[in-house]
């Protein structure tokens, strides 16, 4: 079932390397390169990772093989812990998002951007709230008013973990509108893929990324 988009809120995505990776000029990978996605298949981070991987292949940018590895779970902790254990090895990179900041601040992640080597901000995105096309909610005002009147009237599926960017993008406008956030039904998922299915079923509203992405790699130990 088609969905409609409501209420745009700004958000960011990039690439990380393991910490303290130092690359000599002209360095080239010598074995398989793994691009980690800290979410399940089908979401915005996964689509970004697979787009980067396709560009690598189409332009023949790597002299070795490469794969995309979905390492979801633990509010991105599974992916970042895996990357952190490969310190100094630039053959492992990870897509990342603002969740690496927000979930460190709220205590769900022990690692943060300073534990890795940020490489580039690849794109930016807006976060949009989506509902089924036949939903009575047609505008951001409708969404806010429904929750102001009855905070438990809607179930909101978060495409990133509780405490992540989608959670913040939901909480800020509701807080500004005086909605009792403690009564709002929020459920976190490992990517935007599953929330979109729930929205299609007609029982959920969901914030979705429309995408921005970063790459990261783990930092090498000295």
Image: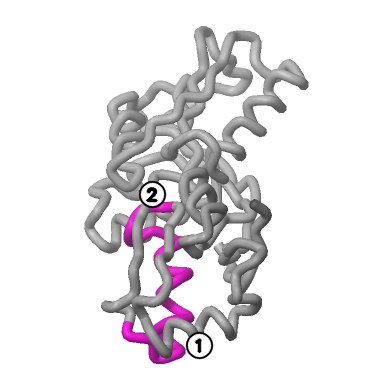
Quadrant in which residue 157 is drawn: bottom left
Which residue is depicted at the point 50% across and 64% down? 205
Helix, strand or loop at mark 1: helix
- Determine the image quadrant of residue 56: top right
Is 171 in the magenta? yes
Q: Kindly give the residue lying farthest to the right in the view shown.
A: 59
Sequence-wise, which precedes: disc 1 or disc 2? Answer: 1
Residues 11 and 169: in front is 169
Q: Name the residue under label 1.
A: 145
Q: Where is residue 58 in the image (x, y as percent from the top left)?
A: 76, 20
- Where does residue 47 sit, x and y in percent of width and height? 60, 38
**Label 1 packing within 10 angstroms: few (<14), some (14-19), many (20+):** some
Residue bearing mark 2: 189
Q: What range of the chain is rendered magenta?
A: 160-180
> Counting other residues with Cα less than 10 Å from the Cα at mark 2, is it few (<14), some (14-19), or many (20 or more)?
some
What whole-number distance in Å separates the C-alpha atoms at marks 1 and 2?
Answer: 25 Å
Residue sitting nearer the eye, 94 or 75: 75
Is 115 left, or right, of 117 in this rendering?
Answer: left
Residue 206: where, in percent of width, then height? 50, 61
Task: Classify 34 as above or below 155.
Answer: above
Residue at 44 percent of width and 78 percent of height: 172
């Amino acid at each position: 079932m088609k969905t409609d988009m409501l209420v745009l809120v700004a958000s960011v995505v990039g690439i990380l390397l393991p910490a303290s990776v130092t690359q000599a000029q002209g360095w080239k990978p010598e074995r398989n390169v793994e691009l980690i996605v800290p979410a399940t298949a089908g979401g915005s981070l996964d689509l970004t990772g697979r787009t980067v991987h396709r560009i690598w292949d189409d332009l023949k940018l790597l002299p070795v093989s490469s794969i995309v590895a979905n390492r979801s779970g633990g509010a991105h902790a599974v992916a970042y812990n895996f990357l952190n254990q490969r310190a100094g090895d630039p053959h492992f990179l990870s897509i990342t998002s603002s969740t690496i900041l927000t979930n460190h601040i709220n205590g769900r992640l022990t690692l943060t951007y300073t534990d890795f080597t940020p490489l580039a901000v690849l794109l930016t995105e807006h976060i949009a709230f989506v509902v089924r096309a036949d939903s009575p909610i047609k505008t951001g005002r409708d969404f806010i008013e429904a929750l102001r009147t009855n905070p438990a009237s809607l179930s909101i599926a978060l495409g990133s973990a509780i405490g992540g960017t989608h959670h913040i993008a939901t909480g800020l406008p509701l807080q500004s509108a005086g909605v009792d956030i403690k009564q709002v039904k929020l459920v976190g998922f490992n990517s935007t893929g599953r929330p979109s299915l729930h929205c299609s079923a007609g029982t959920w509203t969901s914030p979705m990324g429309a995408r921005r992405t970063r790459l990261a790699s783990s930092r090498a130990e000295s």
